[in-house]
Image (cartoon, rainbow, N blue to C red):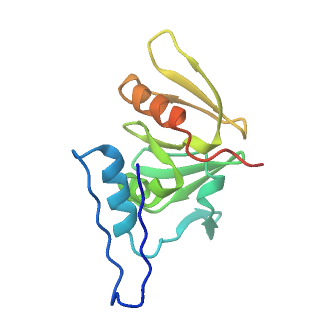
Amino acid sequence: MKINIDIDDKYEETSVTIQAREWTEELEEIVKIVKKRRQQRLFGIESDQTILLDPNEIDFVYAEKRKIFATLKGRTIEVKMKLYEVEEMLTPYDFTRFSKSVIGNINRIERFELSFNGNLCVYFHSGNKEYITRKYVAAIKEKLMKGGQAYDR
């Protein structure tokens, strides 16, 4: 991919032009990031207190019994949003779909192993583990191979 940036006083406002042979998932992600206005904050509820969550510390977010929970550092904190809303908000932080009810942070993955049924068992740096269903395994392997960000302790 080639990136050109032209900064000049003659421009009234910022404009983005993408030239490509065909539409790809990568272009779709770029458009989502560019269109995204100011990043919203992710809040969790724990013991009747509202907590500001750092997306870089979250291992995964999951739905269970019509509620949404974020898992980080041995804690599970309820999030008062829909899973698809959390997914849209966390996509710039390299979160991706693991299954119908789970989105995970690929930068927090320490290792993974293949299960007998074709699923992946993912282990996070915090010690948490989660499963990736077969439907999403190929896409996640591709994202991991492309790099993303390296995990910094």
- Residue at 41%, 90% in the rendered image: 9
Q: Is residue 95 visible?
A: yes
Residue lying at the far top in this picture: please name it. 116
Between 102 and 23, the one nearer to me in the picture: 23
Quadrant in the picture for residue 46: bottom right
- Residue at 66%, 44% in the rendered image: 150
- Residue at 29%, 66% in the rendered image: 17
Quadrant in the picture for residue 37: bottom left
Quadrant in the picture for residue 86: bottom left
Image spot of residue 100 (x, y percent) = 36, 37
Image spot of residue 28 (x, y percent) = 31, 52
Q: Is residue 9 above or below residue 79?
A: below
Q: Is residue 137 left or right of residue 127?
A: left
Residue lying at the far left in this picture: please name it. 22
Between 78 and 128, the one nearer to me in the picture: 128
Q: Is residue 121 above or below residue 115?
A: below
Image spot of residue 59 (x, y percent) = 61, 45
Image spot of residue 94 (x, y percent) = 51, 49
Q: Is residue 116 left or right of residue 16?
A: right
